[in-house]
Image: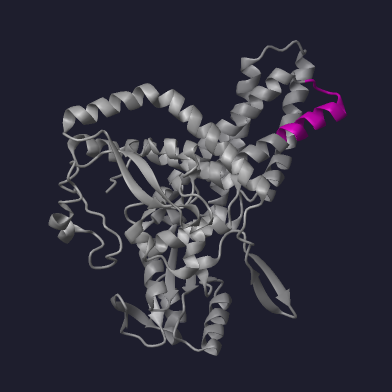
């Protein structure tokens, strides 16, 4: 995958350069034009170095799970620094004098074209089994099962699940039922070779500490990538830092409190985004409200009490998508709850008969959530944040995860981008916790862009 991404960068940069030259007038002579091209080609290795420093070729970046939005930030920084380096190179040599107009156009085109070409290369990688890493999970508990399910459901991570092994072979049992094992850890070397495995993940195996170390050593001898699911992984986010004291590693967790300036920036983004959104969408919202009234009896808007920042209750605004007496009919559809057996704390009904025809359309395109921009202006919510829970759901949030209420709930968030309807309750609260304890303005912007991307590719919403 690294070679594909490198090819994407070189193709995108070269295309952007010659396109910018073709779209801008030049008064330079033939010799200066040739020097400009030569200096650009000479600067390409510098672009690659900057991209590498930005992590665009790191091992994690080689996987296919990175979205176009994830790539955009790295490409933006690389293009900005690379354009300055090219300008510096031409200025120092004095052999070429590209115009400011051409440089700005090249910078814009480089960001756009490289991002698009990278996305195309990743799409190619997802369709080629040669770019999938075959994985064996060492462990048979709930965490191992959860990891296996995520690998199976999300091929975009570039991983292919082979199976599980643990201390005892055969079938293992956990809280969610039995897991069929490929064999024992003592026979892992043979299984890895027989199934052409590329990667082994240790997920809380029942092996002893020494046996696990022996497994790691054996896999390293075979040049197999080994990953370990850390204890207390629920609270480890991207800002966790690794320290050592005399060879003993310590994982440092970020201080989960936003500074005054951070809260100001977040609120500023909320006000600007919500105000602009409402101004632009007001005519459309009026049409939607009229459409709802014509389709079924009842109000156009739906209000419900949710739990907000600091456990303060507020009323959330949404377009009504169900019949007006939906709450009274809830008992009639309780048996259809998709989480009824696995997690009764969540109430999600696929193809809910209480949803109106217009409501189904609004949910599919997430239009029903646009009135929440009013909540953002009022200060009850943020554009990005934890999921706004109803009172019954909030009651079941575990004590450690209540840190999620340190920030205002959001119109969107990690839970929305990753699939709001399908995510289990505990996973959703964990994502909220990670968002709050690892907050950054860049992450908010990234999640907004990912939400727009998700809206353009609608999924079923319950």
Percent across and percent down for residue 31 are 79, 18
In-front residue for pair 344/427: 344
Q: In percent of the image, x 75 and y 20: which residue is there?
A: 98
Q: Is residue 255 left or right of residue 230?
A: right
Q: Is residue 66 left or right of residue 142?
A: right
Q: In percent of the image, x 83 and y 23: which residue is there?
A: 95
Compared to residue 371, the image places residue 230 above or below, namely below
Residue 316 in view (yes/no) = yes
Percent across and percent down for residue 415 are 42, 53
Q: Is 267 one of the magenta-colored residues? A: no
Q: Main secondary structure of the magenta part?
A: helix
Total labels drawn: 0
Compared to residue 185, the image places residue 1 above or below, namely above
Residue 160 in view (yes/no) = no
Determine which quarter of the picture holds residue 339.
bottom left
Compared to residue 134, the image places residue 459 above or below, namely above
Magenta stretch in the rendered image: 82-97
Q: In percent of the image, x 62 and y 63: which residue is there?
A: 240
Percent across and percent down for residue 276 are 50, 27
Question: Which color scheme is applied?
Answer: one colour
In-front residue for pair 47/454: 454
Q: Is 94 one of the magenta-colored residues? A: yes
Q: Residue furthest left?
A: 332
In-front residue for pair 110/322: 322
Percent across and percent down for residue 326 are 19, 47
């Amino acid at each position: 995958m690294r070679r594909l991404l490198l090819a994407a960068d070189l193709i995108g940069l070269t295309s952007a350069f010659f396109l910018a030259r073709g779209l801008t007038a030049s008064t330079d002579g033939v010799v200066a034009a040739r020097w400009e091209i030569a200096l650009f080609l000479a600067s390409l290795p510098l672009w690659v170095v900057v991209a590498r420093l930005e992590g665009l070729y790191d091992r994690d970046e080689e996987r296919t799970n990175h979205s176009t939005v994830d790539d955009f930030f790295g490409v933006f920084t690389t293009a900005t620094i690379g354009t300055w380096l090219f300008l510096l190179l031409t200025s120092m040599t004095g052999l070429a004098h590209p115009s400011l107009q051409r440089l700005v156009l090249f910078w814009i085109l480089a960001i756009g074209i490289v991002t698009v070409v990278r996305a195309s290369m990743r799409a190619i990688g997802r369709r080629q089994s040669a770019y999938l890493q075959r994985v064996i999970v060492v462990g048979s508990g709930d965490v191992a099962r959860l990891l296996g399910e995520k690998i199976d459901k999300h091929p975009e991570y570039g991983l292919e699940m082979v199976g599980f092994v643990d201390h005892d072979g055969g079938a293992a049992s956990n809280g969610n039922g039995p897991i069929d094992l490929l064999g024992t850890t003592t026979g892992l070397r043979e299984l890895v070779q027989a199934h052409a495995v590329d990667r082994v993940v240790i997920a809380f195996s029942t092996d002893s500490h020494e046996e696990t170390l022996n497994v790691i050593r054996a896999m390293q001898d075979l040049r197999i990538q080994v990953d370990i699911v850390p204890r207390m992984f629920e609270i480890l986010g991207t800002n966790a830092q690794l320290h050592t004291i005399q060879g003993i590693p310590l994982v440092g967790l970020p201080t989960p409190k936003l500074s005054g300036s951070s809260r100001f920036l977040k609120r500023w983004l909320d006000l600007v985004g919500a105000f602009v959104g409402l101004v632009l969408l007001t005519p459309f919202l009026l049409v939607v409200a009229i459409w709802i009234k014509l389709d079924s009896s009842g109000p156009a808007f739906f209000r419900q009490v949710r739990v907000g920042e600091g456990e303060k209750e507020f009323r959330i605004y949404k377009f009504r998508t169900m019949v007006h007496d939906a709450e009274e009919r809830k008992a009639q559809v309780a048996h259809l709850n998709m989480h009824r057996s696995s997690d009764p704390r969540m109430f999600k009904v696929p193809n809910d008969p209480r949803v109106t025809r217009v409501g189904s359309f609004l949910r599919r395109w997430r239009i029903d959530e646009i009135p929440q921009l009013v909540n953002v202006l009022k200060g009850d919510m943020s554009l990005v944040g934890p999921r706004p829970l109803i009172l019954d759901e909030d009651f079941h949030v575990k004590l450690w995860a209540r840190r999620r209420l340190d920030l205002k709930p959001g119109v969107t968030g990690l839970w929305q981008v990753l699939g709001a309807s399908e995510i289990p309750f505990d996973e959703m609260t964990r994502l909220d916790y990670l968002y709050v304890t690892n907050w950054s303005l860049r992450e908010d912007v990234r999640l907004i862009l990912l939400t727009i991307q998700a809206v353009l590719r609608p999924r079923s919403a319950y």
